[in-house]
């Protein structure tokens, strides 16, 4: 962790919820958020595909 | 040998000579085995200046006996069916008469050989070359509380009986493949099963494990001598022993997927689940592949430096502790800078003049998990949920120009593992967590995914997911605040974000396709809690059954119903009027489970009270309602011994004030109500 922060740094989160309530985001934001999360899901799917085992590998013996 | 046992000060030569005699193996062969060099190095690192070595010449090992019956008994050569067993004790002292010390030990008198000095045992098969049937040695590291973030070894309690003396050791058993009934995959499964089960007693033999890996009427080659098992066969064997297998291939693009391997190992191993790791063994100097090999992961260690830099604790995994039948138990293998596993065996000139040493690389190839069948929700979904939630909040804070706070949220780290319900409840019970009673009394599934969020190495909050749920279920179960102040701030941020998300994203025209993520369940959780049960609890107290039901409140085995009105909407029972001139009776009231205001009369000396308003069902708070003629107002109090007595004085007053504000004043707008002034002892 950056030396800039320690556990006491979290005290700045106090009252943040009220600021959020008073300051809702612009309506277009939600569309951007959805796009952002879908991109993440797609990127992850590629990584997970990498560790799927194919049939040939499934039948290879450990024999040493 | 014609004696039942013998005792020596351990040195590698007499140990090897004994083994050579029992197994009919040339001494030179034994001394040049890598496992023997490893074991000698290992024993030197265990406590005690000297090691005492007590051998039992005839020991019946049930696993070998099964193997013997399956195979060796049918050989032409008359292999013995009895094993021998060697026990080790670590002691400190000079000029010790070991024979006398052991006799004292057997006679239960003072001896240098004590239970607490016990280091474990080795069972020796009476067959040549591959004789290490069962090695159960004390690990060189003992877990202590909080060590999961540093170093952790998965250990099982083993009980040992030596000539009637009960000895104990925490370890995981190791076995060398005999190259007949077992190859590396079978021994790896054998260790896996021991590390998974509670005791050694339920452990199957090597021959049984190998057989279980083959289908009946199979078209495979012969089972014995066994030449190894494939992932498919390992999975079949795991299913035979009631485990649900999962497997992953890391050989396609190892460098890109190494972080997933570390995550899996940390998540399951730290939850006390061993893993089978398939590796490609390469000579470090020539780079030549020696073949695929299976080992069992029973521990890990984490890089100490800059641990808080990783988003997941698991990404700092540095070394693994494995049972590797080519070496021995608890072999430490470390990730090098290329994320390959370095395997080193230090040469030991005392063991062999050939100076046996080994320097190899293991390239992770396959990871196989064997889980309790009810653990259905996969690790990856839980991890994604935590990271997505973190990213969503970070992005949201940047959007509202809270960049500094967004940076803080980004620095939270995750520690993800499976926990049993009883373990979490016990942790909560022994903690100072706020709202302990509420958490402890909740009904949770037996297995939960726990994602603890840390900041600056301090746990701030923990999220629990039902590990047994279906994939499309709600899955998220509860939020546990560990650091009360900061966790409450986080809860408030989640709630505010969830509110905005619900109001504006769900109701907008955004085409939402990301709801398959469990983060959606968390958002829903914070919304639902706020608008539903929580509101009632916050306003009128929690739900509780009446403290007692009196005989006078029953008639023909049913509770008498004296509720005259049950109000929940402004227009409910408009005809009902409160009678200011009640004779020989008074009004009693209660806020029931759904938040209804129930009012009835209690006649003087009738002993029929608040439970008659609710049919004896749970309610939140109750009291009396009495008209005070002098001030022309109704006085409301919390005087229900059955429903109000568990609250603190402050809570009672707050709940009654809420009942006046949101219930009495609303339903009877022409009347005036106030909280009755009273001394606390007045409450029945």
Image (tube, coloured by chain):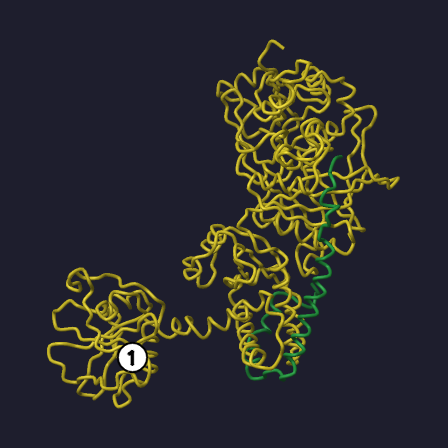
Residue B429 locus on image (x, y percent): 45, 54
The green-coloured chain is labelled: A
Residue B646 locus on image (x, y percent): 31, 65
In this view of the protein, which residue sits in the foreground, A20 or B368?
A: B368
Q: Tell me the quadrant of the picture where the C terminus of chain B can be found.
A: bottom left
Residue B88 locus on image (x, y percent): 62, 25
Near mark 1 (Cα within 10 A), the count class, few <14, some 14-19 or many ≥20, is many
Q: Is there any visible trace of residue B625 in the rendered image?
A: yes
Residue B97 locus on image (x, y percent): 61, 16
Q: Which chain letter goes with mark 1? A: B
| Most distant residue in the bottom direction | B670
- Location of mark 1 (residue): B567
Q: Colour of chain B?
A: yellow
Q: Residue at x 52, y 18 (%)?
A: B104
Element carrying mark 1:
strand
Is residue A52 shown above or below B474?
A: above
């Amino acid at each position: 962790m950056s030396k800039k922060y320690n556990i006491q740094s979290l005290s700045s989160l106090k009252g943040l919820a009220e600021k959020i309530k008073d300051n809702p985001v612009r309506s277009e934001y939600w569309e951007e958020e959805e796009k952002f999360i879908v991109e993440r899901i797609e990127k992850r799917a590629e990584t997970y595909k990498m560790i799927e085992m194919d049939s040939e590998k499934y039948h290879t013996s450990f024999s040493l | 040998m014609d004696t039942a046992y013998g005792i020596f000060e351990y040195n590698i030569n007499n140990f090897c000579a004994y083994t050579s005699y029992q197994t009919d193996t040339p001494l030179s062969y034994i001394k040049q085995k890598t496992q023997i060099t490893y074991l000698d190095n290992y024993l030197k690192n265990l406590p005690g200046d000297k090691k005492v070595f007590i051998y039992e010449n005839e020991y019946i090992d049930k696993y070998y006996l099964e193997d013997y019956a399956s195979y060796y008994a049918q050989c032409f050569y008359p292999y013995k069916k009895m094993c021998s067993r060697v026990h080790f004790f670590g002691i400190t002292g000079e000029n010790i008469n070991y024979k006398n010390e052991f006799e004292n030990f057997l006679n239960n008198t003072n001896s240098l050989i004590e239970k607490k000095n016990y280091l474990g045992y080795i069972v020796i098969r009476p067959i040549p070359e591959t004789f290490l049937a069962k090695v159960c040695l004390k690990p060189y590291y003992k877990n202590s509380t909080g060590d999961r973030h540093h170093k952790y070894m998965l250990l099982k309690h083993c009980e040992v009986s030596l000539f009637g003396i009960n000895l104990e050791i925490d370890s995981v058993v190791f076995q060398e493949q005999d190259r007949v009934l077992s190859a590396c995959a079978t021994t790896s499964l054998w260790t896996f099963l021991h590390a998974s089960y509670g005791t050694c007693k339920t452990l199957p033999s090597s021959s049984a494990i190998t057989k279980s890996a083959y289908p009946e009427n199979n078209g495979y080659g012969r089972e014995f001598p066994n030449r190894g098992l494939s992932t498919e066969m390992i999975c079949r064997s795991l299913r035979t022993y009631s485990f649900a297998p999962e497997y992953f291939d890391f050989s396609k693009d190892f460098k890109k997927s190494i972080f997933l391997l570390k995550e899996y190992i940390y998540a399951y191993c730290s939850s006390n689940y061993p893993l089978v790791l398939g590796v490609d063994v390469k000579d470090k100097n020539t780079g030549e592949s020696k073949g695929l090999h299976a080992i069992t992961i029973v521990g890990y260690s984490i890089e100490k430096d800059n641990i808080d830099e990783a988003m997941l604790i698991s990404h700092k995994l540095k070394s693994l502790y494995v049972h590797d039948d080519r070496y021995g138990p608890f072999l430490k293998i470390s990730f090098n800078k290329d994320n390959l596993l370095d395997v080193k065996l230090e040469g030991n000139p005392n063991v062999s003049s050939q100076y046996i040493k080994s320097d190899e690389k293991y390239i992770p190839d396959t990871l196989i998990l064997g889980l309790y069948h009810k653990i259905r929700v996969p690790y990856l979904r839980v991890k994604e949920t935590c990271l997505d939630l973190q990213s969503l909040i970070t992005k949201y804070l940047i959007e509202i120009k809270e960049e500094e706070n967004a940076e803080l949220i980004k620095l939270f780290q995750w520690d993800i593992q499976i926990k049993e319900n009883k373990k979490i409840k016990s942790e909560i019970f022994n903690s100072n967590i706020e709202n302990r009673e509420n958490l402890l009394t909740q009904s949770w599934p037996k297995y939960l995914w726990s994602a603890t969020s840390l900041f600056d190495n301090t746990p701030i909050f923990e999220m629990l997911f039902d590990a047994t749920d279906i994939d499309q279920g709600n899955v998220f179960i509860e939020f546990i605040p560990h650091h009360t102040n900061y966790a409450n701030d986080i809860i408030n941020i989640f709630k505010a974000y969830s509110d905005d998300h619900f109001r504006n994203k769900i109701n907008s025209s955004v085409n939402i396709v990301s709801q398959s993520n469990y983060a959606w369940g968390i958002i829903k959780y914070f919304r639902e809690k706020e608008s539903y049960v929580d509101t009632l609890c916050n306003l009128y107290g929690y739900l509780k059954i009446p403290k007692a039901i009196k005989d006078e409140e029953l008639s023909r085995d049913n509770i008498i119903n004296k509720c005259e009105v049950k109000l929940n909407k402004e227009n409910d029972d408009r005809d009902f009027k409160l009678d200011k001139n009640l004779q020989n009776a008074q009004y009693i009231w209660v806020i029931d489970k759904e938040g209804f205001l129930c009012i009835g009369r209690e006649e003087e000396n009738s002993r029929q009270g608040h439970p008659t308003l609710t049919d004896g069902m749970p309610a939140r708070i109750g009291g009396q309602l009495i008209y005070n003629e002098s001030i022309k107002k109704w006085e409301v109090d919390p005087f229900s011994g059955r429903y109000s007595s568990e609250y603190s004085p402050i809570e009672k007053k707050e709940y009654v004030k809420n009942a006046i504000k949101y219930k009495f004043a609303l339903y009877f707008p022409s009347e005036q109500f106030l909280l009755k002034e009273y001394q606390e002892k007045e409450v029945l």
